[in-house]
Image (cartoon, rainbow, N blue to C red):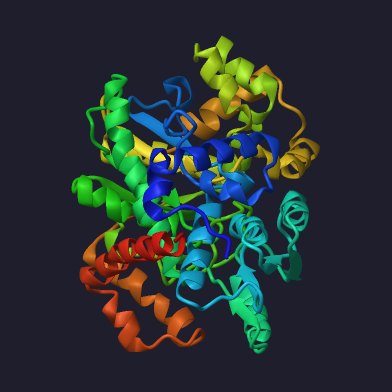
Amino acid sequence: MITGPTFAEMLHPSTIDPATRARALKAKQDDPLDPINLFNITWRDEHDQIYYVVMPHELTGVDAEIVVMYGKQFPSGSHKVGAAYSVLLEKEMFGEVDPAVHTLVWPSTGNYGIGGAWVGGRMGCDSIVVLPEGMSRERFERIERYGARVIRTYGTESNVKEIYDETHRLAQDPKMRILNQFSEMGNYRFHTHVTGGTIVELAAELEQRGIGNGRIAGFAWAMGSGGTNAAADRIKQAFPDARNVALEPIQCPTLYNNGYGSHDIQGIGDKHVTWIHNTWNIDALMCIDDEACKRGLQLLSEPIGRQALVERYGADAATVEKLGDLFGISGICNLLGAIKTAKYYGFGKGDVVVTAAADSLDRYHSVMDDMRAQHGALDTAAACGRIEGVFHAANTDYVLPGTQHNRERWHNLKYYTWVEQQGKTVEELDAQRDPAWWLAHQAKTAAIDARLIESRG
């Protein structure tokens, strides 16, 4: 059995055996497909520093500090690899998956499937990724490069029902194991313990740099599987006043008004409320326009856009240059959501709003080619228009507060997917109303870590 780090080691990679850590860091550069890279699943670099950037105020247009943790340094290029690893690890530790017998099925709209293809291959498993046919070309290419097979289903980002239908068909084979990111609590545990734990520690690291006040004021993150939103459960334990803001596309406003539709913020807005999403911790729901996200990504990805931000608005050149390949479409969505969060709650100087870029530009060159074909390459005037018309203009429209009534409604929406279609019981759904249910799932990380350590002999 090939395994990697414990939850504790993913949170604090400095606790990994030094020889193993050194081998992993060397392989990250020399051999990214070596299984030792499992020990690089962490938000921290070789110096134990968190991967983040403090966004220029000249871009955000707000006095609050908008801090973006970025996932491009994870194996496979996205933090979703951590969720995939955690789900598979638990299945192996408790005997539900045998790499010699079972084929893994990873239902996904992109990054989780890519992470599953990478993790499955490194842990000696045969993998199939079920992915909508309308996702970016780069997603399919990377999955196949990691050695997994792809089944293409109808539609785009929000066509998750079609993914579920295909996984139901595959599940009729007793050798198939469905690792569903939307319902597997390993996804939730990775983000509460590792992502949320990292953000809690980031607050102190920022304060040491003279940024913020040692606390997290807001956390804004768009919902795909709902896994990353689980970080808010940990953040709120450390900072009870922190505001947790969930984001979804205007074009598919499922929680906002029971809406539906197709959109192009790949990785989020999957037209249902996921099983692992703790809706009881949502303080506000905000909707973001997918076209604004793509226009914002084009601004940062094209040199003339970054040049305008430096020369016309006075942003720091080194920071701006770093932004050139740091974001994907959903990362820009999260950034716009963080700006809206700061404006909605009146956060100002000294307040920290944290969000993330789940993946990076390398998965969206084809989308940017389409943007240039449709809108043309940027010039300075167009770049200034994007800075002010996309980022500075982000406002507080499409916002619903997390009232008790709205939280109840968001929770109740789970019934139609999970009880009517996916085999959960009403009793299981009702159990999620109790905060103890979520705390019990967080607590299981210790038992999983203990079993993994024991397996090392």
Compared with 396, 347 (above or below) is above
Q: Residue at x 39, y 32 (%)?
A: 66
Q: How many marks?
A: 0
Quarter of the image where one finds residue 2 = bottom right
Compared with 4, 239 (above or below) is above
* Residue 217 horizontal/vertical position (percent): 26, 39
Front residue of this view, candidates 393 and 276 = 276
**Where, quadrant-wise, is the N terminus in this rendering?**
bottom right
* Residue 12 horizontal/vertical position (percent): 38, 42
Front residue of this view, candidates 148 and 314 = 148
Compared with 189, 211 (above or below) is above
Front residue of this view, candidates 408 and 160 = 160
Compared with 161, 189 (above or below) is above
Q: Tell me if residue 431 can be seen.
A: yes
Q: Is residue 303 left or right of residue 9?
A: right
Q: Residue at x 27, y 38 (%)?
A: 216
* Residue 64 horizontal/vertical position (percent): 32, 28
Q: Residue furthest front?
A: 457
**Where, quadrant-wise, is the C terminus in this rendering?**
bottom left
Q: Is residue 451 left or right of residue 214?
A: right
Q: Residue at x 54, y 56 (%)?
A: 268
Q: Is residue 219 left or right of residue 435?
A: right
Q: Tell me if residue 273 can be seen.
A: no
* Residue 203 horizontal/vertical position (percent): 29, 34
Q: Residue at x 56, y 57 (%)?
A: 251
Front residue of this view, candidates 449 and 325 = 449
